[in-house]
């Protein structure tokens, strides 16, 4: 009897394994490395591997929700509405045209001229500038943050949003359900609603255990967007929080980059917000996208890039790789998390090997121990290829930047890891503007001045157990 029961469970296990392996093989938009990793996981630990695959192996938040989001995004306009904007395409240097074309293809946007960007001095200055713009708003304010804390800066933004709403400005504020769950559960959220702020929650955590059966629960809206009156926008890596970052204080300060922009590219940021807002609240705000946009007086050519599981596959690494291939003199990359695809890592190494001055800046202490170890698995190949590798000491370097040849810069919310490539909804901007690029480049050099260089002899001297653990966690990367 017991033998038959055990035999039955063995048969069931084999059937489930085979069905899961077929699903792994038939799943679209998955690299061969990822397929192989999941197949090994399912075969090595049958029941656990199957469970892990259906929890974390598929990038889906429900077929109906995906279809609805795709339909909403499809229905949004792609072109900036204006009779005053020139139909002549901006003169992007030929060496960067493919990068801009790929970035624009994600959402159907065209690069726009006449933009102007100002790099904010630091996190506190960013919040102060946002509040000043909110206090001067006359029509609407749109806010979207992955993490919005109820600390000093977070509460200042809450108060500013309520002030604007009370004087008749339409304020729409959206947060990610997991990243900002403490705000959503706090009295501040209710106070905002009572003051007239319209609230939205992306991927809410209500009935999470029920949803766990039908969708991947760690898909997050990682974007950071602010739009004021359709004329001003902010884009970068900063959440709405103090640099001391109360939820992970031992890694503080968190060092971010945020850029305040004006010009036609603001419309593209507005469009990304509109898609998220309608998806998660049901309110159709497409009429705001019909407001004519005037030619800006700035000199920057820019295009927004909103990526995610419903958007163009592998857009983030594609744009990074194109930019790296375009570099003639210098590449400086700043990212808190470096767990790249094999193609992206090889492209970075190849740039150094062909004589480009390549610098990669990472935090010395990472808030994710697993990611930190996985990142270090790449150190040996990086420094052997001639990449100048630095570890930033003062805090958690959270800026996500790529500057190329003092002319072009990519900035936003996307990290160089599999989560930003495949799972999160991210928001980046690609800009051709030597002035802004050189300003951001100078900020990166400040990071370098506060960093320890990573020498080849240091990496080669790591003990076997260190290299073993680093490589082990790097191997887990495709499972994400």
Image (tube, rainbow, N blue to C red):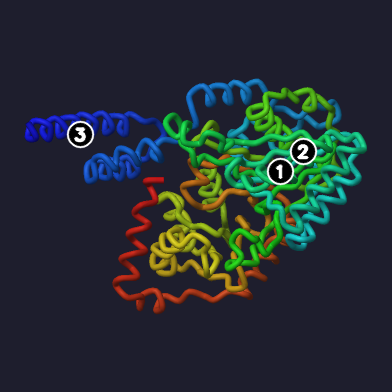
188 vs 402, left or right, is right
Q: Distance of mark 3 from mark 1, alpha carbons?
A: 46 Å
Split into 4 quadrants, where in the image is the C terminus?
Answer: top left
Depth check, mark 3 against mark 1: the one in front is 3
424 w.r.t. 407: above or below: above
For disc 2, the marked residue is 142
How far across and how far down the image is residue 225, in percent? 71, 43
Q: What element carries label 1?
A: strand
Upstream in sequence: badge 3 or badge 1:
3
Residue 158 left/right relative to 46: right
Q: How many marks?
A: 3
Q: In this view, does 100 lie to the left or right of 312?
A: right
Is there CB contact under 8 Å for labels 2 and 1?
yes
Q: Percent position (x, y) of residue 187?
A: 73, 45
Question: Picture coordinates of residue 421 (x, y %)?
Answer: 50, 44
Picture residue at 25% right of the left edge, 44% below the top: 40
Residues at marks 3 and 2, CA–CA distance in whole angstroms: 50 Å
- Identity of the residue drawn at 91% across and 45% down: 136
Q: Determine whether label 3 and label 1 are within 8 Å by CB.
A: no
Q: Which mark is residue 13?
A: 3
Residue visible at 72% across and 24% down in the picture: 283
Q: Quadrant of residue 257?
A: bottom right
């Amino acid at each position: 009897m017991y033998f038959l029961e055990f035999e039955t469970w063995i048969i069931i296990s084999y059937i489930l394994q085979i069905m899961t392996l077929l699903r792994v093989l038939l799943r679209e938009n998955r690299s061969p490395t990822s397929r192989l990793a999941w197949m090994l996981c399912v075969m090595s630990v049958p029941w656990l591997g199957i469970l892990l695959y259906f929890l974390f192996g598929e990038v889906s938040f429900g077929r109906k929700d995906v279809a609805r989001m795709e339909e909403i995004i499809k229905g949004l306009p792609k072109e900036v509405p204006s009779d005053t904007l020139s139909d002549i395409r901006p003169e992007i240097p030929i060496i960067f045209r493919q990068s801009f074309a790929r970035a624009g293809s994600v959402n159907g946007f065209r690069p726009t001229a006449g933009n102007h960007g100002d790099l904010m001095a630091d996190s506190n200055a960013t919040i102060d500038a946002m509040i000043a713009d909110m206090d001067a708003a006359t029509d609407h304010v749109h806010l979207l943050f992955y993490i919005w804390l109820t600390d000093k800066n977070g509460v200042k933004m809450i108060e500013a949003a309520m002030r604007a709403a009370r004087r008749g400005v339409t304020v729409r504020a959206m947060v990610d359900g997991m990243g900002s769950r403490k705000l959503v559960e706090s009295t501040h959220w209710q106070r905002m609603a009572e003051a007239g702020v319209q609230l939205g929650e992306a991927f809410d955590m209500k009935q999470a255990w029920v949803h766990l059966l039908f969708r991947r629960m760690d898909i997050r809206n990682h974007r950071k967007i602010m739009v004021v009156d359709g004329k001003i926008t902010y884009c970068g890596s900063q959440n709405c929080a103090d640099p001391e970052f109360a939820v992970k204080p031992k890694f503080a300060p968190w060092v971010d980059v945020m850029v305040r922009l004006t010009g036609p590219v603001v419309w593209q940021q507005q469009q990304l917000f509109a898609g998220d807002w309608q998806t998660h609240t049901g309110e159709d705000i497409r009429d705001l996208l019909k407001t004519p946009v005037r030619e800006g007086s700035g000199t920057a050519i820019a295009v927004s890039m909103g990526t995610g599981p419903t958007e163009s596959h592998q857009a983030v690494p594609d744009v990074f790789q194109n930019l790296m291939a375009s570099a003639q003199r210098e590449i400086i990359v700043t990212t808190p998390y470096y767990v790249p695809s094999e193609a992206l890592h090889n492209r970075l190494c190849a740039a150094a090997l062909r004589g480009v001055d390549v610098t990669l800046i990472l935090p010395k202490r990472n808030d994710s121990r697993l990611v930190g170890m996985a990142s270090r698995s790449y150190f040996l190949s990086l420094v052997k290829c001639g990449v100048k590798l630095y570890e930033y000491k003062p805090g958690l370097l959270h800026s996500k930047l790529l500057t190329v040849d003092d002319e072009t810069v990519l900035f936003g919310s996307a990290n160089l890891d599999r989560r930003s490539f495949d799972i999160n909804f991210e928001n980046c901007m690609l800009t051709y503007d030597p002035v802004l690029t050189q300003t951001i480049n100078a900020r990166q050099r400040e990071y370098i001045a506060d960093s320890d260089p990573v020498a080849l002899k240091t990496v080669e001297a790591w003990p076997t157990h260190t290299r073993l653990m680093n490589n082990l966690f790097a191997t887990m990367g495709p499972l994400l």
